[in-house]
């Protein structure tokens, strides 16, 4: 019965790329608001745990994807800051930029670290940091530090669930 389901599962080696891609997409400005990244990361990490893939490599994939995604958002904000308020999602929702700017002004460099863990501001803060011309090296170190913390916090629960789900479902008999 479960054989047809396995046809939909990705190859174990593809899971590293899938986790990196989800992490990248979740970190992109605006796109990250639309993608249910936590659910997708948990699902992919669960499969990786089920396949008993190397956890360090999986964490590295999530880390790299997150750093690249935030880096792209920062670069976009840095080089296109004048155009961003006129772009469709921000033209229709200027409060997104306003909230992100308030958060950035309140927490400064720490906003990049803190923002990665809060869904509504996560994909906006790197964009705002770029728009407000945070020094690129400062952003890079904040980005790396936050991704080093974020990857295990978001990946390990799914990985552990996937590595133990069969044991969790193995119910004792009722007699």
Image (cartoon, rainbow, N blue to C red):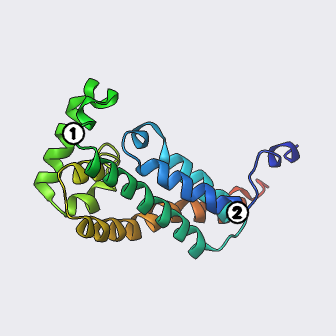
Q: Is residue 39 above or below residue 61?
A: above
Q: Quadrant of the C terminus?
A: bottom right
- What residue is shown at x 47% (from left), y 66% (from top)? 63
Q: Secondary structure at mark 2?
A: helix
Q: Earlier in the sequence, mark 2 or mark 1?
A: 2
- Residue 8 point in image, percent of width and height: 77, 45
- Residue 6 point in image, percent of width and height: 81, 49
- Residue 25 point in image, percent of width and height: 48, 48
Mark seen at residue 50:
2
Quadrant in which residue 84 is drawn: top left
Q: Locate residue 96 relative to residue 119 in the image: left or right.
A: left
Discs 2/1, front: 1
Q: Locate residue 131 relative to residue 52 in the image: left or right.
A: left
Between 60 and 38, which is closer to the camera in this rendering? 60
Q: How many marks?
A: 2
Between 44 and 70, which is closer to the camera in this rendering? 70
- Residue 98 point in image, percent of width and height: 17, 38
Mark seen at residue 82:
1
Quadrant in which residue 170 is drawn: bottom right
Spatial separation of the CA atoms under disc 2 and disc 1: 47 Å
């Amino acid at each position: 019965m479960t054989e047809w389901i396995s046809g939909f599962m990705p190859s174990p080696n593809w899971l590293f790329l899938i986790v990196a891609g989800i992490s990248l997409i979740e970190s992109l400005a605006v796109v990250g608001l639309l993608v249910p990244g936590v659910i997708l990361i948990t699902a992919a990490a669960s499969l990786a745990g089920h396949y008993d893939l190397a956890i360090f490599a999986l964490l590295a994939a999530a880390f790299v994807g997150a750093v690249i995604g935030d880096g792209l958002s920062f670069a976009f904000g840095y080089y296109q800051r004048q155009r961003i308020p006129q772009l469709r999602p921000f033209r229709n929702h200027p409060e997104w930029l306003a909230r992100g700017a308030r958060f950035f002004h309140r927490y400064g460099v720490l906003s990049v670290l803190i923002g990665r863990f809060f869904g509504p501001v996560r994909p906006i803060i790197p964009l705002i940091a770029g728009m407000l011309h945070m020094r690129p090296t400062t952003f890079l170190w904040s980005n790396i530090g936050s991704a080093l913390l974020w990857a295990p916090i978001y990946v390990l629960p799914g990985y552990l669930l996937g590595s133990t789900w069969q044991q969790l479902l193995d119910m004792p008999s009722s007699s």
